Amino acid sequence: MRTPRLLAALVCTAALAATTAGCSGATKPGGGNAAYTVTPTSPAAKGRLASLTWSLYAEPYTLDYAQAFDYPPNTVLANVCEQLLRVTPDLKIEPGLAVKWANPEPLTWVYTLRPGVRFHDGTTMTADDAVASLKRQMDPATGSPWGSAFKNVKAIEKTGPLQITLRLSRPDVLLNELMAASPGTIESAAFLKKTGKEYGVPGGKVNCTGPFALDTWRQGESITLKKFAGYWDPKLAPKTDTVRFTFVEDPSARTNTFLTGTADGGYMVPSSSLAQLQASNKGKLYYGPNTAAANLAVLDFKGTLGDLKVRQALSMALDRKNIIKAAAGGVGIPAKSPTARGAWSLLPERTEGYFKDLPEPVYDVAAAKRLVEEAGATGKKVTLATSTLAPEISVVANAVQAAGRQIGLDVRLKPVSPEAYSSIFVDKNARKGLDLVITNGYDNTPDPLEFYQYFRTGDFGNYGEWSDPSYDAAFDRANTAVDPGARSDLTAELQKIAVRELPSIPLYEAPYTVFLGKRVTGAPTGIAQLYYPWAATIGAAN
């Protein structure tokens, strides 16, 4: 479950409200109060730009690819660093720094690197760089949140000047797909060795292969990228010379940067401003494919929520339609599962069938109260983290508290700082005393199996340490299925278990958002922007 990146998605809303919008063209989702169309891209650019200013809702905490596990750092790095494979705006996987890959037998993945690719310092990429970059993810000293992606890797070897081979202890199809996300990033081995602990920190440098190079990082102020003239892919040669990122945490102030033209655009538009920006003549608001859904992640299965009846009761007590109105600007639909429909882009034609098999979210306060009584949980405490990180967090937290109290649970809100809130997802100690946290589960790849790996026993994203041997066995079966149809069907079985057992309580899903000022166009509109070099396609609108 891609929940760790949680913080951000709540600033925008959550996941795709359409069954197939993640894979093709435009779709009109149902639900919500606003009519909107989901498209993977905005109109193509018509000219070049000397510079572009882009608004982020928060400053990146790092530009180290091995530590980048949230929207702000990945939004910047998508234009600077590249992976072996590439996720496209319509959520497909294509060759990236690897021109081809092969799985000659179940325990081996072989990647043939693209020749002639240069790093930003002018040096040429080799297999040595790829081996060093991937091994760094596995090194405990790195402390990478992506380390669990390599859990089945025994060795990473150079098997040719432009070839690397990953040798596994057990079959792992998902590992290959994650080579299109941060785990597959390639950095210069020499540069990593030279910079050491200064790599990717504020004021530090990054030396990757993307269409833009890191120019300056003025902490607390801005990050500036400059066009890389030696970029290998002519289809993504930048149409803009300089991209400057600014950081505006306050939603109203950020909206004002769009309306005044201080910023040319930004992803993850504050949901409280959707209607205002939709009606504005200062630019255009786009809705794009998303793989995310807002959820309540259970952090303690030894406490009150360890009883399935209590989790079911809390889910039944939530008025999701009103939560969507208050927290998501009315744009979205109640979530039937912890994954959004947009996460099912492996075989999108099957998505509708999978979701028809799931029960609709039930809103029944009386029945929920009876379940709490049956569980002997009346009056028991449930502690939910809340934060000023985003207004949506407070809105949802208040709704959960009110719902819980209606059915006899003593739901208490624990305010934490934005920094402490983010620590909940990377530091086990930060979860102590908490039963629930509002999060956002999403995929980086088109395969929903990526999300469901995080409910496996012992996985990094399994924050509450939920464990179900039958679930683990089902996951392992899915992860050995090379055929996409078989893997998709097996993942649907995992989804049914998750919906039944509720290790995470689904809330709602909504589309991705991006606002583009009148002078710019060409940006991809969806969540693929976390790895696709989106800034390269932005140019002049006229």
Image: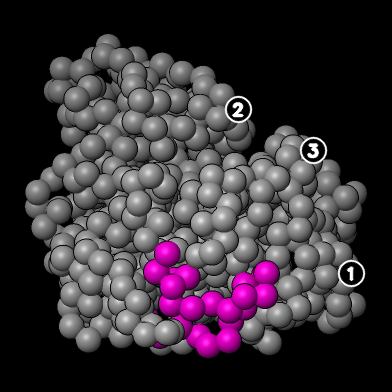
- Report the disc number at residue 50: 1
First in residue order: circle 3 vs circle 2? 3
**Distance (Cα) linking label 2 and label 1:** 36 Å
Q: Quadrant of the C terminus?
A: bottom right
Q: Amino acid at mark 1?
A: Ala
Q: Can residue 270 be seen? A: no
Name the residue at 29% across, 43% down. 462
- Is 15 in front, or is 104? 104
> Mark 1 or mark 3: which is in front?
1
Q: Residues within 10 Å of mark 1 (few under 14, many from 20)?
A: few
* Magenta segment boundaries in residue numbering: 111-132
Report the side of 328 relative to 293 (left or right). right
Label 3: which residue?
A: 253
- Is 473 in front, or is 69? 69
The stretch drawn in magenta includes residue 127: yes
Residue 55, x across and y down, in percent? 75, 50
Q: Amino acid at mark 2?
A: Thr
Mark 2: secondary structure: loop
Mark 3: secondary structure: helix
Mark 1: secondary structure: strand
First in residue order: circle 2 vs circle 1? 1
In the figure, residue 267 lies in which quadrant? bottom right
- Report the disc number at residue 444: none
In the figure, residue 465 lies in which quadrant? top left
Residues tagged 1 and 3 counted as in contact (Cβ below 8 A): no
